[in-house]
Amino acid sequence: MDKFIALFLALLFCVTTVFQAQAEEQAPVFVMQEGGPATIPAVHLEFLEGADEAATFEFLEKAEWTPKLVEDQSLVDGYWVRLRVQNMLLTDEVGIKHNFNKEKKIFAQHSNGFNEYPYWAESEGSWIDEGRINANYLVTMPQGEITTIYNFFRSRPFDRYYSKVDGLDRITIGEWADIRFLDFFRLATNIGVASISTAFGLYYLFMFVVGRGSYLWLSASLFQISFHCCTHLALSSVIKPPSWLSNDEMDLASISLLFVFLLQFFRKSLDLRKNFPTPDKVFLAGLAFYSTMVVVNVGSSFTYPSAPYLDLVAHPPDRTGPGIVKLSYLVPPFLLLLLSSAILSLILWRRGSNYAKFLMVSFGLPFLAVPITAVTYLVFGFSWQAWMVISAAVGLLMLAMFITFGFAVAQQLADIKNLALTQQISLTKAYQRFVPPQLLQNLGRASILDVKLGDQVDVEMSILFSDIRSFTTISESMSPGENFAFVNAYLSRMGPIIRARKGYIDKFMGDGVMALFPISAADAVRAAVEMQKELHCYNEEQDLTGAPRINVGIGINTGRMMLGTLGEADRMEGSVISDAVNLASRLEGLTKRYASKVIISEQTYRHLDKGKFDCRLIDSVVVKGKDRPVRIFEVIDGEPPEVARLKRATLEKFNEAVSLYKGQKFAEARDLFKAILSESEHDNVAKLYVERCETLLEGGWNPETWDGVERLETK
């Protein structure tokens, strides 16, 4: 019997020895060499689940370890890692660094016995202690010996940027001086970014108070960067902000808010609304998206930590991070808009903008991080040296970007001031004309001697703009003297008509005229009709002499404006300033588009007595530089006699066709416009609507967004 017992014990010893050998093969010793911190490959790690920080060293020695972590939930509940390290360094002071865990405890077994290192929790105690910086521990490992490390980790609530494998289990080991330097470097980088961002934010805020411009959004972006450093990056471990402010959901809200401020700065600095209206709509959509993300993530932060951060069985770790819309989907659209900003600034620079070159450099600087990162990885690989170089480079690029942003805004303000000064000089030179007597009457002055610089009154008037069509082509066949004679002959016929209708010419603009009618809108419309009739007689005379015929477009608007004197003490002139004047000019330009002789605004149309003139509504437009649509009318009386007769005959059909068009009944509208053309073949407005209807019928339209308003991008 004793022989059987001895044989059994011998077999048991052999089996135990085999299993121990296999275990040692599964977790080979990691040899720590000189050359800086290194990440320990997973093959050197063993795992123990189901034990917390209260486990004793004796329990850990006898426990059964596995070569990999089995349960996802262990990341939240806590687990132990065992590894054997042979210290081949020139020091026994070794640092152990672990990826972003929130709780930690260490046992170290060596020839001198074992050392127990105190339990650490992120939410408790100081961020630094003797032999510890946050979760980075100083562990004594005798030189040349193999030390067994028992390392406890817990991440509760779970950081969803990481995973079970090659994520939170990544352990970096090296000389304590190097590990400590890396953490201090990371902290110093954060402090530097936060400090510089705050300083420049205050500076740009002061610049905004003094000079306005785009400094406000630049300042807000810098303050947001500083805030993010304090609440979500390395600096937060020192400051320890409340969890509702520093949780993962608020991290996304903070990043989204930064994108909101930066995109608004991009829009304002590039003046997208004026320079690039279509891209501006894309940027506005980006602003709406990121603003929504701010609201959504702030709202979800109130329930943090929710199930995805605590229950990894139902919500396995997937590296995608927190939030409904993940960070991987938030960043690319912003980078595309940043790249678009660089391209648009280049276009502005080529157009002659001085400040755009600074913007282009600023927008392009962040993209230098790509080649720098690539070169760094080629040189250092995936190592702590690479991380340091990349972190420093990105920080410097960000700092350089915001500095050059400041230069761009400063140059932009200088350009605006220079432009204003240039325009004022040009304006003063242009106001070297006689003052019409009507101006004196409107200003309440009996004599030109009584007029003073700065005299002004708020009045309601009708403004008439007229212009000769294709004047450049006509003038090319004339000598300079003939050109002057031609223009003066034309103006000598138009001026008396304007004065006869109680108006006066405010400006001669080459072949164009700007006239004001202070009494009645009907005076302006009557003058326009008579100018067209006089032009018909003038063209008949031109036919007899073989001279070229001319066509004139006239636009009229009615509204309030400031009328007064501009200039300087020794040289001044009367003028009017208002949006109503600009609109009248745009209406004159629209006569080309609609091939009409006289176009008036709805405001002018409402001032006319019913039946005094034959008019028809031809469109609703948003002219360049405006936001609101304006209904425009064609004055039929201003057309040639035969054309006017046919337009009057088809007026009811035309009004019905326009109504069908506005009602999105394009096929019926097209057919009716074609019927009008069969009766009045020179009705150019009807031709235009036929083309619009066919385009819409062929290409389709969105019934919900189509409003029948023509938006014009040119003057």
Image: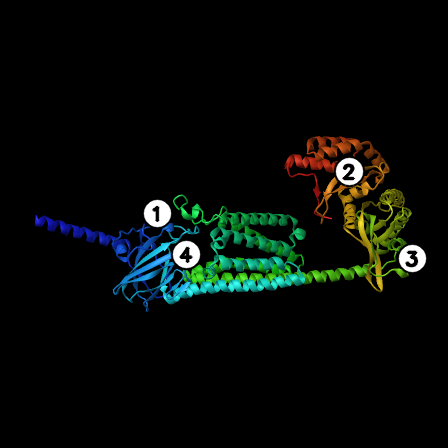
Marking on residue 100: 4
Name the side, left or right, on which 221 lies relative to 313. Answer: right
Q: Position of residue 550 (x, y in %)?
A: 83, 45
Question: From the viewer's perspective, is 568 left or right of 208?
Answer: right
Q: CA distance from mark 2 to mark 3?
A: 42 Å
Amino acid, disc 3: Ala
Label 4 and label 2: CA atoms lie apart by 70 Å
Q: Nearer the viewer, residue 698 or 161?
A: 161
Q: Residues within 10 Å of mark 3 (few under 14, many from 20)?
A: few
User: Mark 3 = which residue?
Assistant: 446
Residue at mark 3 to residue at mark 1: CA–CA distance: 97 Å
Amino acid type at circle 2 is Leu
On the question of residue 522 being in view, the answer is yes
Q: Residues within 10 Å of mark 2 (few under 14, many from 20)?
A: some
Q: Quadrant of residue 216?
A: bottom right
Q: Residues within 10 Å of mark 1 (few under 14, many from 20)?
A: some
Image-quadrant location for residue 452: bottom right
N-term mark: 3 or 4: 4
Image coords of residue 537 (percent x, y)? 89, 43
